[in-house]
Image (tube, rainbow, N blue to C red):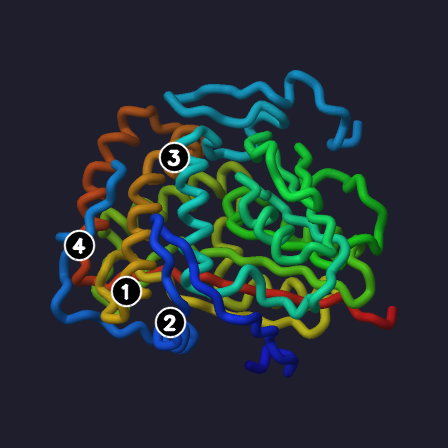
Amino acid sequence: MAGEDGNHTHEAAPYGVSLGGHQLAYDVEAVEQVGARAIVADSDVMTDAGYESDGASSVSTSVSSSIWDFSFENGRRYHKFREGRYNFPNDDIEQERETMKHAMVKLLCQHLHFAPIGDGPHEVLDVGTGTGIWAIEMGDTYPSANVLGIDLSPIQPEWVPPNVRFMVDDVESPWLYPKNHFDYIHSRHTIMAIKDWNRLLKTSYEHLKPGGWTELQEIHHFPLSSNNTLSDNHPVAQYWKYVDEGLETLGVNFRFSDEGRIASMMRQCGYVNVAERVFHIPIGTWPKNKTLKSVGLHWKTILLDGIQAIALGPMTRGLHWNREQVEAFLIDVRKGYHDNSMLLYMPLVCVYGQKSETL
């Protein structure tokens, strides 16, 4: 498949994806539908009945005790290092949700990455690694690579492949590693955290080796309707509007993941061979295709399980609501997510660009 600059996207071998304990095989029809942005609705499913969820100095200084501490707010646990820098919890419930999100994206995209990094990358950086699951799988997939995952929270497992390690770090502060060091820099689901994307993309560019790649995979969290029935005053639409307003007050541009914006800024920062791929993530079980139906069920579950975690920071810190106001508002939002008739989805925008081999 040709990218925007005429380069061809890297197609790794298809593989099955484990989601919810079940091995799901590569689904050609599902890939074709999300690639064409034309998910076919199942006329027999307008509710999710039968598909219910089971669950309701340098920054990189030597590790001090404060880095391993946590803060608590509104009944949720948050990072202590650079406290307040990231407005969402890191407790066990949130970690389980992030793991499910990783499996869902793999099932939808069928790949860990799209940038054509070759078979033997040496230095790989995962920005905002979270639980570290992507970095661990990259380490297993590319034994030749040294994979480094950085995050504000020390929530990664201790038992990892020998070529994978983690560091507590703030990616928006000066980087510890030298320029021209990494073969591949990856970032996913950090749209809610980064304040200065222009600076981050420039810093990433400087620290790539000539010919290296940077890839961003970000969800545009403002729901769209395949049949244009989602109104601005619907509780789900209002929910993301308030999250956006709260994050904007806190200095985060939550709309940067809109189609075309990341690619445009990457070009402005000097990247070449920039390509963008967009996948539609259904919300709920309305797609006819079984794989996409499973993706939609899990994405709706992820959103419902995280409905409080996503709302509390932006709405209490940014909009100055109290916890009781947030909880009362969320009642109608939860109900709104169960309506399959609107055929809701969110775009997943995957963009990658290369540092020129001749500088």
Callout 4–callout 2 Cβ contact below 8 Å: no
Residue 315 visible: no
Q: Which mark is residue 48?
A: 4
Q: Which mark is residue 309?
A: 3
Amino acid type, residue under disc 4 in the picture:
Asp
Q: Earlier in the sequence, mark 2 or mark 3?
A: 2
Neighbor class of circle 4 (other Cα within 10 Å; few <14, some 14-19, many 20+) is some
Instruction: Give the SS element for disc 2.
Output: loop
Callout 4–callout 1 Cβ contact below 8 Å: no
Front position in the image: 79 or 328? 79
Q: Which mark is residue 27?
A: 2
Q: Mark 1 = which residue?
A: 225
Q: CA distance from mark 4 to mark 3?
A: 23 Å
Task: From the viewer's perspective, tell me whether residue 236 is left or right of residue 199.
Answer: left
Neighbor class of circle 1 (other Cα within 10 Å; few <14, some 14-19, many 20+) is some
Q: Is residue 273 above or below residue 233?
A: below
Q: Which mark is residue 133?
A: none
Neighbor class of circle 3 (other Cα within 10 Å; few <14, some 14-19, many 20+) is many
Task: From the viewer's perspective, tell me whether residue 223 is left or right of residue 211.
Answer: left
| Position of the C terminus by quadrant | bottom right
Task: From the viewer's perspective, tell me whether residue 262 is left or right of residue 164.
Answer: left
Residue 273 visible: yes
Q: Is residue 241 above or below residue 117?
A: above
Amino acid type, residue under disc 1 in the picture:
Ser
| Position of the N terminus by quadrant | bottom right
Q: CA distance from mark 1 to mark 2?
A: 24 Å
Image quadrant where residue 323 sits: top left
